[in-house]
Image: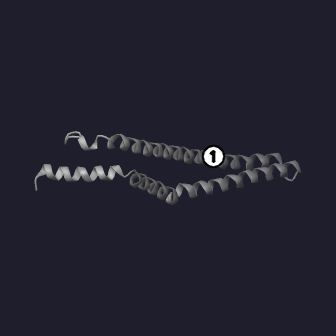
């Protein structure tokens, strides 16, 4: 088969696929949805939020115990230090996860720019030569 004929057939098929915007948008959405549902980061975030709530509740209980003289100042300091350290570690990891979600949003915006690129590409798609294709 001649290369120029094959190129023409392949390009026409590519152009046909590019003209179906919903096909591209559906595929992008499917991939993003799959990434969101399978993403272990989401489960980790939920675990971290539960741990953070638990650490904060423990801190409240320690303060209440100290105020009711059930705990000495030294015991309060020792226990509070460890709880604050764990709380900060959770907050740091949650911030990292949030930053990852922001990067994910950037990818979504990139997907939108891909669709706008396809819109621009569709108009002259029939008149492009081999080099431009």
Q: Is residue 41 left or right of residue 1?
A: right
Write the residue at 59% across / 44% down: 95
Coordinates of residue 26 in the picture (x, y in percent):
43, 55
Q: Where is residue 47 in the image (x, y as percent from the top left)?
A: 62, 57
Secondary structure beneath dot 1 equals helix
Q: Is residue 119 above or below residue 58?
A: above
Seen at 80% across and 53% down, the residue is: 61
Q: In this view, does 16 lie to the left or right of 84?
A: left
Q: Which residue lies furthest to the left in this view?
A: 2
- Residue ID for mark 1: 91
Tell me if residue 73 comes above or below residue 45 in the rendering.
Answer: above
Kindly identify the residue that appears in the image at 67 percent across and 56 percent down: 50
Seen in the image, is 108 located left or right of residue 16?
Answer: right
In the picture, the quarter occupied by the C terminus is top left
Q: Is residue 50 or residue 111 the one in the foreground?
A: 111
Would residue 80 be seen by someone viewing this image from the given angle? yes
| Quarter occupied by the N terminus | bottom left
Residue 106 spot, x, y in % from top left: 48, 42
Residue 46 appears at what percent x and percent y?
A: 62, 56
The image's colouring method is: one colour
Q: Which of 110 and 16 is in front in this view?
A: 16
Q: Residue at x 47, y 46 (%)?
A: 108
Number of other residues with Cα within 10 Å of mark 1, as a class: few under 14, some 14 to 19, many 20 or more: some
Is residue 71 visible in the rendered image? The answer is no
**Is 104 left or right of 79, judged from the image as shown?**
left
Number of numbered callouts drawn? 1
């Amino acid at each position: 088969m001649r290369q120029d004929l094959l190129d023409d057939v392949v390009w026409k098929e590519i152009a046909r696929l590019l003209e179906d915007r919903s096909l591209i948008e559906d595929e992008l959405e499917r991939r993003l949805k799959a990434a969101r549902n399978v993403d272990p980061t989401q489960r980790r975030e939920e675990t971290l939020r539960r741990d953070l709530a638990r650490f904060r509740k423990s801190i409240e209980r320690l303060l209440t115990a100290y105020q009711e003289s059930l705990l000495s100042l030294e015991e309060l300091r020792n226990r509070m230090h460890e709880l604050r350290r764990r709380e900060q570690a959770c907050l740091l990891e949650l911030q990292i996860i949030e930053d990852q979600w922001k990067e994910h949003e950037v990818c979504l915006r990139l997907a939108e720019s891909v669709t706008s690129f396809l819109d621009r590409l569709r108009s002259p798609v029939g008149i492009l030569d081999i080099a431009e294709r």
